[in-house]
Image: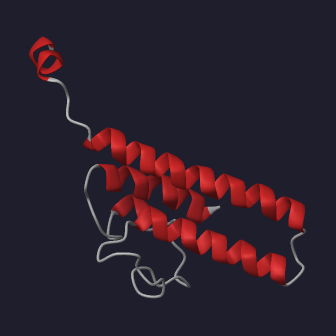
């Protein structure tokens, strides 16, 4: 649950282009057992913390399914939700990077 809250807070910081895990509002949500920015092989030079959190969540639930602690049907639902969170994160980044039309800027 803490990692889901960390995903939301990290998404907020990512959209504001505030990289890192040193934010005060993230401290209580990322457990010490996770060593972010080191264990997950980055897909590029710069990996966003929310994507890394989703990757950890996916690995955690995959392990639970493999160990037979989680049935395949709930695992499928969880996988879909994690996929949707990833898509929403990408959509938010697309929107935040879209320039505002000049006529709208003048009106504002």
> Is residue 68 found left or right of 59 in the rendered image?
right
Q: Quarter-wise, where is residue 59 in the image?
A: bottom right
Give how far across and how far down residue 7 sits, in percent.
50, 58
Report the front residue among 69 and 106.
Answer: 106
As drawn, is 53 to the left or to the right of 58?
Answer: left
* Count of picture labels: 0
Name the residue furthest top. Answer: 107
- The N terminus: image quadrant: bottom right
| Extreme residue toward the bottom, this view | 39
Residue occupying the point 43% across, 51% down: 90
Q: Position of residue 56 (x, y in %)?
A: 58, 74
From the image, which quarter does the C terminus lie in? top left
Seen at 71% across and 61% down, the residue is 79
Q: Position of residue 9 (x, y in %)?
A: 44, 54
Residue drawn at (38%, 66%) of the image: 48
Q: Nearer the viewer, residue 81 or 34?
A: 81
Say above or below: 62 vs 26.
Answer: below
Q: Is residue 85 above or below residue 48?
A: above
Residue 42: % across, % down: 40, 79
Q: Is residue 7 above or below residue 56?
A: above
Coloring applied to the structure: secondary structure
Left/right placement of residue 80 relative to residue 8 reads right
- Residue under the point 14% across and 11% down: 107
């Amino acid at each position: 649950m803490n990692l889901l809250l960390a995903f939301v807070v990290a998404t907020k910081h990512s959209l504001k282009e505030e990289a890192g895990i040193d934010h005060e509002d993230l401290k209580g949500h990322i457990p010490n057992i996770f060593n972010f920015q080191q264990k997950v092989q980055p897909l590029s030079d710069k990996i966003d913390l929310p994507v890394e959190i989703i990757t950890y969540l996916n690995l955690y639930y995959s392990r639970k399914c493999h160990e037979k602690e989680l049935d395949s049907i709930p695992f499928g639902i969880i996988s879909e939700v994690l996929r949707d969170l990833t898509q929403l994160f990408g959509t938010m980044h697309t929107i935040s990077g879209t320039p505002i039309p000049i006529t709208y800027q003048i009106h504002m």
